Amino acid sequence: MGYTCLVVDDEKELAIATCEYFNMFGVSTTYVRKERDCLMFLEQNEVKLLLLDINLHEESGFELCKKIRQFSDVPIFFISARQSDDDILMALNIGGDDYIKKPYALSVLLAKVKVVLKRLEDTREKLPMHSGRIRVDIQARKVYVDDKEIELKNKEFKLFLYLYKHPNAVITKDELFANVWGDAFFSDGTLNVHIRKLREKIEKDANNPEIIKTIWGTGYRLEL
């Protein structure tokens, strides 16, 4: 499953308040309170940005940051009541992208997060997206298969683009409804029809798909 932001903070009330505020403004956010829970969460979920406290009971956010940097370049904002320049320099030198001092204003924190997320999105959308037989031009909203443009309706394009941005990963039906339709309460039939139309336009044989695979009982996987 994908989240925009993960809060790692042992102050439960503050973590919950931050999540509720971010979610209210459309930034999907959840929290964990311990290092091991954070690492396990990152193994199982996609996250675009981390808000990481330095003091996690007996654990150190600094050490957790070092571990994360061994396998991920996800942006990390340190959030801490510690005010010293040494702590700030340590946080930035080991891979932190910003340092937010507690107490912080949720509105200001959200604004900082949105700036980074917008920059990430702009950078990603400027990159060419090409893999095997498929090429996607996001700005022009066009999909090419074997250099032939495929005519897709708006919802078909959004559905295909979401799958294409998560290649070889199993995407659940609920995730597709939430991210493509913006609602989790559409019927399976709606999704099935759109998948069928995509296959008819993209696959060599829609009845034996090689690109968009059905994962029975779960969702779909786009194989590249």
Image (tube, helix red, strand yellow):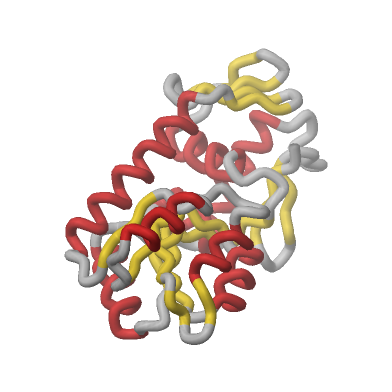
Asked whether 58 or 114 is in front, the reply is 58
- Within the image, what quadrant is residue 77 found in? bottom left
Is residue 224 shown to the viewer in this render? yes
Which part of the image, by quadrant, shows the C terminus? Answer: top right
- Where is residue 81 drawn, in percent x and y? 29, 73
Q: Is residue 152 above or below residue 36?
A: above
The residue at the point 21 percent across, 66 percent down is: 104
Is 130 on the left or on the right of 6, as rendered?
right
- The extreme top residue here reads 147
Asked whether 139 or 9 is in front, the reply is 9
Which part of the image, by quadrant, shows the N terminus? Answer: bottom right
Is 147 on the left or on the right of 66, as rendered?
right
So how many labels did they put on this image?
A: 0
The residue at the point 39 percent across, 65 percent down is: 29
The residue at the point 37 percent across, 45 percent down is: 117
- Within the image, what quadrant is residue 212 found in? top right
- Where is residue 92 drawn, in percent x and y? 44, 51
Is residue 173 shown to the viewer in this render? no
Is 114 on the left or on the right of 170, as rendered?
left
The residue at the point 65 percent across, 14 percent down is: 148
- Where is residue 175 drawn, in percent x and y? 52, 59
Q: Is residue 203 above or below residue 218?
A: above
Q: Is residue 30 above or below residue 170?
A: below
Is 49 on the left or on the right of 209, as rendered?
left
- Where is residue 156 drawn, in percent x and y? 51, 37
Asked whether 83 or 213 is in front, the reply is 83
